[in-house]
Amino acid sequence: MKWSKEKIKDKKEYFLSQRKNPTGKFTEMVVRTYFLIYKQCSLNDNFCPSNKINSRILVSDVYENFYDNKTSNHVPSVVDECINNLNKMGYIKFIKTNSSPKWMVKIEKNLDFILDGEEDFYFKKYNITQKIV
């Protein structure tokens, strides 16, 4: 279930302020998580099985160059929280399709709290070649 419009607006404003003046790493982790999910969805007509974006799969890429790259500092539950934020804000959606009883993930919209040029940066970083939304 999505958050209220007011909560989404507040969260977007917070994330945008963090893009401009970062004081922590969570917003960057949300952005990385989004583009890693985007990459998986771009490979299959904007759908990917939810097990392909499991936090244990994404955690090393989300934490890249944080905390001296020590895997002992990688926390999958933080990635789960990133996924939860993206879902509750309406950027991604978990659905079941007629063709599969498994949960699938779909990109619903582009991030609207990133700065100019950041989308291109992450497309290159994660080798995303197909725009889907």
Image (cartoon, rainbow, N blue to C red):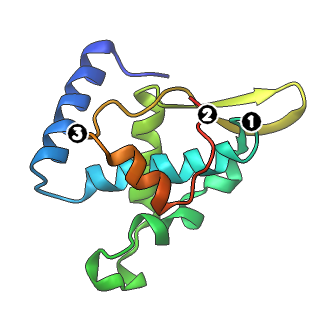
Quadrant assignment for the C terminus: top right
Residue 21 x %, y %: 9, 49
Label 2, residues with CA under 10 Å away: few <14, some 14-19, many ≥20 = some
Q: Are marks 1 and 2 in contact (CB under 8 Å)?
A: yes
Query: Cα distance, mark 2 to mark 3?
Result: 23 Å
- For label 1, the residue is 45
Identity, as a three-letter code, of the amino acid under mark 2: Ile
Identity, as a three-letter code, of the amino acid under mark 3: Phe
- For label 2, the residue is 132
Q: Nearer the viewer, mark 1 or mark 3?
A: 1
Label 1, residues with CA under 10 Å away: few <14, some 14-19, many ≥20 = few
- For label 3, the residue is 15
Image position of 127 (left or right of 24)? right
Query: Cα distance, mark 1 to mark 2?
Result: 8 Å
Residue 57 visible in image: yes
> Picture quarter containing residue 74?
bottom left
Residue 64 x %, y %: 39, 73
Residue 102 x %, y %: 80, 40
Q: Are marks 2 and 3 in contact (CB under 8 Å)?
A: no
